[in-house]
Every structure is written in C-alpha cells, then in structure tokens.
Image (cartoon, helix red, strand yellow):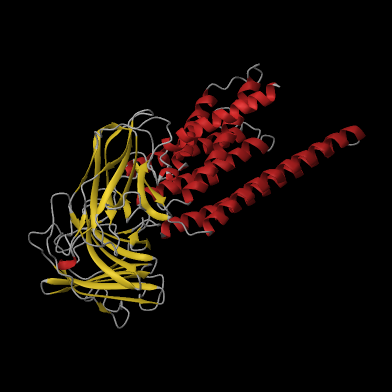
C-alpha cells in the first residue's frame, strides 16, 4: 500500500506546485481572460500600483509607451482592451523594452497581445510599447494584474483611457512629441537600384562585397548620394519583412538614428525611428523624409528617400559626420517587426557618407567573436584532440627520454595540452570583453563554456601534483585525470555545437553542423581504429608467446609494424583535423 499512497501524494504535490511554477516564469496564458492568478486567495481591493501613458490620444498604427509602476512586486500581467468592454478580447500588440524582465504572451490567439514577467525577481517599474492596430476606432484602457506575494495581489488595475484621435501624434519619448505631421505620398519605383555608380557618385555598402542589387537576390545594398544640401538614400535586400539601417557612434545598438522600410499588406512603409538602449525602435514622423519610393519584386524589398544633411531642432543625426553604419533585416507580422534573426552588418570603422564616395563592405561577426571561435576551434579540434591520442596510444611508440628526462610522448602530450588550456583561457575572455559582461541571449553556450574553462584550468593543476608511477595514489590520479579530460572534451564539443548557431559568428547553415558532425565522427573513428589495432597487436603477441617460436624476433617485428601503423594513422588524423579546422576558419573569416 505504500507505493500507491506515495504515488497519490506525489501526484497531489505536483498539481499543487505546478501553478506556482508556471506563474513564477510568467507563462500565464491560461489567465489571459480573467487576469486572476490561481493562488486561491482574495485579491486586494485598493491598488497601490498605477499605469501611466505617454499620451492620452492615439491614431491607428501609433506607438504608445506604457509604464506600470509602484511598490516592489514580483509578477504582473498587462493587456489592452476596449474601454467599453473590459471583459472583451485584447486589442493591439506590445513590444518589449527590456526582454530580461518582461515577455510577450499570445492571448486569444493574438501574437504579443499581453505582457508578463520572466521571473519572480522584485521590480518597481515595467515599461513596454503598445502598437495600436490600424483598424482601431475605440477607446482603449490598459489592465494590469500585479502580484506582490503569493497571498497579496491586485487584479485588473485600470489605466487612464486612451482615446482615438483624428490627428496623428507621433511620439518619440515621454516628453517629446511632434504634433500634426502630414503624411507625404510614397511613389513606386519603376526599376531596381544599380551599383554602377558605387565609388563614383555613391557611397555604397554591399554584402556580399561587390554584389549587384539589380541581379542578385541575396544582395544587401545601401547607398548614399549627396545632392546639394540633401542625401538620396537607397536600400535593398531579401524581402523577409523589413530592412533597416542605423547611424551609430559605436558598434553597439542603442541611442542610434534608424530608418526602416517595413513590408505590410503589399506595400512598404518608410519610417525614421530611434533606438533607446537594446529595445525596439520608436517610430518618428516621416515628415523629415522626402521623395519616398519603394518596390517589391522577385523576393526583394527596395526603398529610397531623400533627407536633408542637417535637421536643426531635431534629434536626427547630421549626415556630414562620421558614424558606424548598421544594416539589418528581419520578419514582420501584421506590421509588427521582430528582432533580426541574424547579426546586423556593421562597418569596421566610422564613415562620413557625404564625403568622398566609397564602395565598402561590412561584417556580421565582430572581430573579437571571430577570434573567440578561432581559438576554441584550434584548441579543441587540433591541439586537444591530438594531445589525447598521443597520451592514449603512443606511449610505446615514443618511450625514450626527450627533454628534462621525460619520455618524448609525455613531452608532446604536455605541450599540446598546455596550448589547449592557454587557447581556451584567451578565447574564454574575448566574448566578455566584447559584451562587457554576461550575454543573456546566448542560451546554454556560455554556461558550458564556463565549465570547460574550469576543467581546462583544473587539468594542468592536477598534473602538477601527479604522484610517482609506483605510488599507491597513482591509480586515483590516472582515473581523475582521464575523467576530467574526457568531460572537458565532451562539453567543449557540445559548447561548439551551440556556439555555431549563435548569430555572432554568422556561420553558414546547415553546412556548419554537418562539418562539426564530420569532425566528431572523424575523431571517434580514429580512436576506434587505434583501439582495435592495439587489441589485435596484443592478441598477436600473446599467440607468439604461447607458441614459443622465435619469440623475440617476432615480437620486435610485430611491435615495429604496430608503431609504423600508428604513425601513419596519426599523420592522417592530423591532416584531417587541419582540413576541418581550415573549413571553419575560412567560414569565420568570410563573414
């Protein structure tokens, strides 16, 4: 009877815990309609938190900044609904400002129609953007459920009413507005852009280098042509949903002057915008842009517009200064843009697009991340794997003393493994220098990298305290050393598999995965081959000893043949490893 009772108790406990676990990570779609947590307690009556908006009226398609603030709280759920039907379906969609503390939910099968917390960490304020749908003609009210503790929470805290307006109040921030902008007509381009004037009349950025937007589908193209006191800008690329470029004072996204071409409903909308920190862009009025035009054809999106070099009284950057230039693309859904799936193309230095025309490229992979990948590939695809084979199979091949009275195989093994540890340490530091801290968007890769780093440091430290060969503790050391090294190799390969999928290296897919699988199969196959050979050689020697016929001569012959075979396998293995390494390093250097 104990087992059924235990099972029943465990089942009840699991069901009691699961709602709490779900709400702790903010996955509360089951509460979208009622907005009531399943905590089994009565909600508080007087709200102590408030919802504020950066404007009180809106036009369809407008962007509203919504702030939920108050005393410390752990969880929340935020929706926008019809002010005359607060029990109705959510209206519009949200964009995140800080993805570490907030996440989008799909309520009533509408993507991004609600926002919730990502963890039970304490917070005092949440800010998001709300995108008004293009067919919105009703007054909107925001509702929030706020959880302070498991037993203390408030349900459906109301915001001020947001009313529709006949005037489009484009907003840039909570304190800056542009009133009554006029929408300028947008023309349709009759033909594709050309790269013929790049370096002559136009300042061009192209990826791949020297690609032609007129003939190549995958060509990302951005050009600037100075015309008196204005600049004509052309942008072209694969039609995934949107194209954008940004002018930046550094190579990090944030506080940048951004221009976007967004494909929606068989047309293209052109917007200037701003990026504050690592958040979604905030659209500005297109009144500063002239002669806007677009084209959709053959899977390519193209747009062009003219902008004055200087815009006094505006936060837009002057175009006659030097900036890093970003070129990014991504998908859209009902006009809502999503984060770019690949690393933006970024110029390697600052440029003045109004100065001398140039024809340049860029990189989607930062230099420090390239070196990080290169060091790790060299460490674990060459020096580490070769060093392991030498220690495992070449003790009888190179037994003679070499340097400092140690056997040659040991010296080779030690040098290779010290190189592996050194390359790992250097490569480990580079992403932290680039990111200036921990990357929240890299998944499990940095966690595995930290474990590999610790093991790479631990291995040589263990080797320093290696007991003599006849010491009773030597067996313990051997197993510990082997276990630590094996764990480091397995985790390093796993980390490389995960790291290759990150946008920072921008390696070609799926070729990168096939190449890594090929390397793993190559290494495992070589180890299996040498294990089989060692076993057959042992069996051959045992048979010779049993026959007692020409034992010494036959043993020496078999041993010599075995050593020659191992050397051939090692040379072949090294050549194969260098071939794999060349493939990966070439891919890293090209992107």
State the image quarter where residue 477 is shown.
top right
**Residue extending farthest left:** 312
User: In the figure, is residue 538 to the left or right of 425?
Assistant: right
Q: Is residue 399 visible?
A: yes
User: In the figure, is residue 535 to the left or right of 587?
Assistant: right
Q: Going 19% across and 60% down the picture, which residue do you hit?
A: 284
**Residue extending farthest top:** 472
**Residue extending farthest bottom:** 190
Q: Going 31% across and 82% down the picture, which residue do you hit?
A: 191
Q: Going 77% across and 39% down the picture, which residue do you hit?
A: 535
Residue 164, percent across and down? 21, 59
Residue 21, percent across and down? 46, 34
Compared to residue 145, the image places residue 591 above or below, namely below
Which of the two residues, 341 or 366, is positioned nearer the viewer here? Answer: 341
Q: Going 21% across and 72% down the picture, which residue do you hit?
A: 305
Which of the two residues, 74 or 406, is positioned nearer the viewer here? Answer: 74
Which of the two residues, 230 or 365, is positioned nearer the viewer here? Answer: 230
Residue 276, percent across and down? 23, 50
Residue 202, percent across and down? 23, 73
Question: How many tags in the picture?
Answer: 0
Compared to residue 148, the image places residue 537 above or below, namely below
State the image quarter where residue 121 is shown.
top left
Quadrant where the image shows the C terminus:
bottom left
Compared to residue 234, the image places residue 364 above or below, namely above
Quadrant where the image shows the N terminus:
top right
Q: Is residue 419 visible?
A: no
């Amino acid at each position: 009877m104990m087992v059924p009772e235990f099972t029943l108790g465990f089942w009840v406990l699991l069901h009691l815990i699961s709602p709490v676990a779900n709400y702790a990570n903010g996955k509360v779609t089951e509460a979208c309609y009622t907005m009531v947590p399943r905590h089994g307690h009565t909600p508080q009556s007087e709200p102590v938190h408030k919802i504020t908006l950066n404007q009180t009226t809106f036009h369809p398609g407008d962007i509203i900044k919504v702030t939920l603030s108050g005393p410390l709280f752990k969880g929340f759920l935020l929706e926008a609904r019809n002010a005359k039907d607060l029990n109705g379906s959510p209206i519009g969609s949200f964009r995140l400002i800080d993805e570490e503390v907030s996440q989008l939910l799909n309520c009533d099968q509408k993507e991004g129609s609600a926002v919730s917390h990502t963890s039970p960490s304490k917070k005092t304020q949440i800010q998001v953007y709300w995108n008004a749908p293009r067919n919105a003609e009703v007054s909107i009210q925001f509702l929030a459920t706020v959880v302070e503790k498991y037993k203390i929470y408030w349900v459906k805290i109301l915001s001020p009413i947001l009313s529709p307006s006949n005037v489009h109040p484009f907003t840039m921030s909570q304190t800056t507005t542009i009133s009554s902008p006029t929408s300028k007509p947008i023309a349709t381009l009759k033909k594709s852009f050309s790269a013929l004037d790049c370096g002559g009349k136009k300042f061009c950025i192209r990826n791949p280098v020297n690609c032609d937007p007129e003939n190549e589908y995958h060509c990302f193209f951005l050009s600037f042509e100075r015309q008196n006191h204005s600049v004509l800008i052309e942008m072209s690329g694969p039609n995934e949903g949107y194209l954008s470029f940004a002018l930046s004072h550094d190579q990090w996204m944030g506080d940048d002057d951004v221009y976007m071409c967004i494909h929606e409903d068989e047309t293209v909308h052109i917007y200037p915008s701003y990026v504050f920190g690592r958040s979604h862009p905030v659209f500005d009025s297109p009144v500063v842009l002239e002669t806007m035009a677009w084209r959709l054809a053959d899977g390519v999106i193209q747009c062009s517009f003219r902008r004055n070099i200087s815009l006094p009284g505006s936060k837009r950057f002057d175009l006659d200064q030097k900036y890093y230039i970003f070129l990014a693309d991504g998908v859209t859904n009902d006009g809502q843009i999503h984060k770019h799936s690949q690393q933006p193309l970024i110029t390697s230095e600052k440029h003045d697009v109004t100065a001398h025309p140039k024809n340049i490229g860029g990189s989607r992979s930062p230099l420090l991340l390239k070196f990080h990948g290169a060091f790790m590939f060299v460490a674990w695809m060459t020096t580490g794997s070769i060093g392991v084979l030498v220690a495992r199979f070449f003790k009888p091949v190179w037994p003679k003393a070499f340097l400092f009275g140690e056997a040659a195989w040991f010296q080779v093994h030690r040098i290779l493994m010290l190189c592996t540890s050194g390359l790992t340490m250097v490569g480990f530091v580079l992403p932290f220098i680039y990111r200036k801290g921990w990357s929240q968007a890299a998944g499990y890769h940095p966690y595995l990298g930290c474990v590999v780093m610790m093991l790479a440091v631990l291995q040589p430290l263990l080797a320093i305290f290696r007991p003599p060969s006849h010491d009773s503790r030597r067996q313990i050391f051997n197993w510990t050393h082997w276990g630590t090294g094996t764990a480091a190799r397995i985790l390093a390969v796993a980390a490389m598999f995960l790291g290759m999928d990150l946008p920072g290296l921008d390696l070609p897919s799926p070729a990168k995965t096939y190449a890594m699988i090929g390397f793993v199969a190559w290494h495992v196959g070589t180890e299996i081959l040498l294990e089989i050979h060692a076993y057959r050689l042992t069996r051959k020697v045992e048979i010779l000893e049993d026959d007692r016929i020409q034992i010494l001569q036959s043993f020496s012959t078999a041993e010599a043949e075995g050593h020659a075979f191992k050397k051939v396998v090692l040379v072949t293995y090294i050549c194969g490893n260098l071939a794999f390494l060349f493939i990966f390093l070439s891919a890293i250097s090209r992107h």
